[in-house]
Amino acid sequence: MAGSVLEIKNLHVTIEGNEILKGVNLTIKGGEFHAIMGPNGTGKSTLASAIMGHPKFEITEGSIHLDGEDVLEMEVDERARAGLFLGMQYPSEISGVTTSDFLRSSINARREEGDEISLMKFIKEMDKTLDFLEIDKNMAQRYLNEGFSGGEKKRNEILQLMMMKPEIAILDEIDSGLDIDALKIVSKGINKMREDNFGCLIITHYQRLLNYITPDYVHVMMQGRVVKSGGPELAQRLEAEGYEWIKAELGIEDETVGQKA
Amino acid sequence: MAKDIPEMEEYKYGFHDKDVSVFRTERGLTKNVVEEISRMKEEPEWMLEKRLKALDVFYSKPMPQWGGDLSELDFDEIVYYVKPSEKQGRTWDEVPDEIKETFDKLGIPEAEQKYLAGVSAQYESEVVYQSLEQDLEKLGIIFKDTDTALREHEELFKEYFGKVIPASDNKFAALNTAVWSGGSFIYVPKGVETTSPLQAYFRINSENMGQFERTLIIVDEGASVHYVEGCTAPVFTTNSLHSAVVEIFVKKDAYCRYTTIQNWANNVYNLVTKRATCESNATMEWIDGNMGSKLTMKYPAVLLAGEGARGNTISIALAGKGQHQDAGAKMHHLAPNTSSSIVSKSISKKGGKVNYRGIVHFGRKAEGARSNIECDTLIMDNESTSDTIPYNEIYNDNISLEHEAKVSKVSEEQLFYLMSRGLGEQEATDMIVMGFIEPFTKELPMEYAVEMNRLIKMEMDGSVG
């Protein structure tokens, strides 16, 4: 039986009065991997943050539902507890809070009171996942993201993803700033998550991530909308030919959100 | 995320038991009151003389015009001495039930069972309960309330009392010297190292009662000690005054750490003079946590008098609605190759005001001395304020001084990050605040770290809306 369904309909989002998303439609189901591609400035990261409920963004029109529940009615933490996860492009540094303590609090936030994960079980699982992601065990005792390299931050996001086991994950440029070895490890982690109860939306503007993760669906964003969708072959064509042919096909001159279509 | 900030909860420890005291002086400060205190305590003549001299100094010194607002402090409204019961409790069984109940509410017996090697708990002006593990006595360590120490170790007491903080130091040191009562006295003999901390727990329990405890610690050559005190006071509507003096002597190669957590009720004036003097290669560490009170003025000092002496201060200050924390540290480098470090963490919320005020002094002889100062402030909302006021006095060219100051707010991005993992806004805020003060809490004995985190959580409750 397949897992959760995240349904985004006609989503319009503004920031400080500027409309960034202009009617995004997208449905992600458990078991599916979606990739959103597109040049910079087309609204990809805005979509990720808006789904998770970043306070900076205002939803002016449209809806987001998770298994029929109105996501837009939920606070950020409620969205997380409902099963959404956002792997961030720029994770915050939290001084004085160890990665390990944070992880355990996050896991327990999704569990009922009195049903918290046992310390032994947590440590065992964390050690296993750290090994899998080839992360130095000392990282668990370092302060969250403080002084982490770009690669360490991204691996830490995947560590959280694997430990928290959300229903639907959105990974915002999880590949940016990674060297090829780190990219392989991050991909390995994401692929390990693949199962019927897990759906994933991968946002990237580099095709190279998709050499390691094969998406079931590929979408192209321009001017704050999904302008084209297809299978993995779409990503390959973008890799070979760039975005110009799509712009030509759709009669778009400037793909960024500032322009009228 | 505009915040609608609810009123602060009623102070959790704001209960107070029926007053069981058997003797108290009249309100106000007169020569008569001072003589009465000395007579009640059956003190030697020299102490009475010191008290009376100090009283004159107190009268002659003007109110400080810097730091905080002391204009509402009325010395005539304060009771200067309250004796809680006829004699000191020798064992727990002898401690009056009502006092025990208060301790119960504060969780003292538990703390004692788990962690304490020696306990000296002060209730009102005098220590009513004191137990020392036999080990400490065998090592020759003296750990008494200060009144008892004066009776039983008069010569030692006389040698050190008022030597690092004379009555003439400041108005409140003079006041304390005139009316002091209670506090801890510790002597650690040469080469003796204590393994677990010595602890005292005390609280004010009588309305308008000033608490003027006097603490005197002498750590002899090569010895080592860690003293811990934590305070909490009940809520009263009129002003209370807490004006303590802590004097510490750290001899050659000795080590002393003094850990305080103070959580005063919102109406307490907390005006404390703390100073240690370090001989060569000695180390003094002040771990100082200041919460609550109406106004706190406290700047633990270290006189680095001997070559290679070290002084460290790690402090936190939290100011909420109607509160002003004016706290910091003083380091006086008076000898070559001395070193000091100051780490100050300040939090202000709901209109609270928190200032770091500190002095680092390098004297002419401070060749090769170095100091490192780090002041971090976390401001929780737009009504709250903070200032960093460092004074540096440098009379030697060959020194090194680093100063780092940082003011931050809980950022939207940090909150979003933590909340995106399922933590509620309050929990996420608590986590950021606790992380901020972690450099302080990690220095505390575990029991106190737990209590500290609980207090901070309580204080932060309702700080988001």
Image (cartoon, coloured by chain):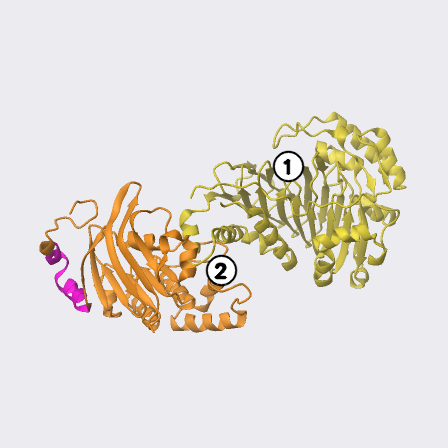
- Judged from the image, the secondary structure of the residue bearing numbered disc 1 is loop
* Foreground of the two, B344 or A118: A118
Q: Residues within 10 Å of mark 1 (few under 14, many from 20)?
A: many
Q: Which residues are magenta?
A: A232-247
Whether residue B167 is visible: no
Q: Considering only vertical position in the picture, is A14 above or below A229?
A: above
Give the residue pinned by disc 2: A98
Percent x, y of residue B273: 69, 39
State whether residue A113 is above or below residue B102. Answer: below
Q: Is residue B237 visible?
A: yes
Left or right: B425 as drawn, with respect to A230? right
Chain coloured orange: A
Q: What x and y, as percent, mark residue B352?
A: 56, 38
> Mark 1 is on which residue type?
Lys
Secondary structure of residue under mark 2: loop
What chain does badge 2 belong to?
A
- The yellow-tinted chain is B
Residue B294 numbered tag: 1
Quadrant housing residue A209: bottom left
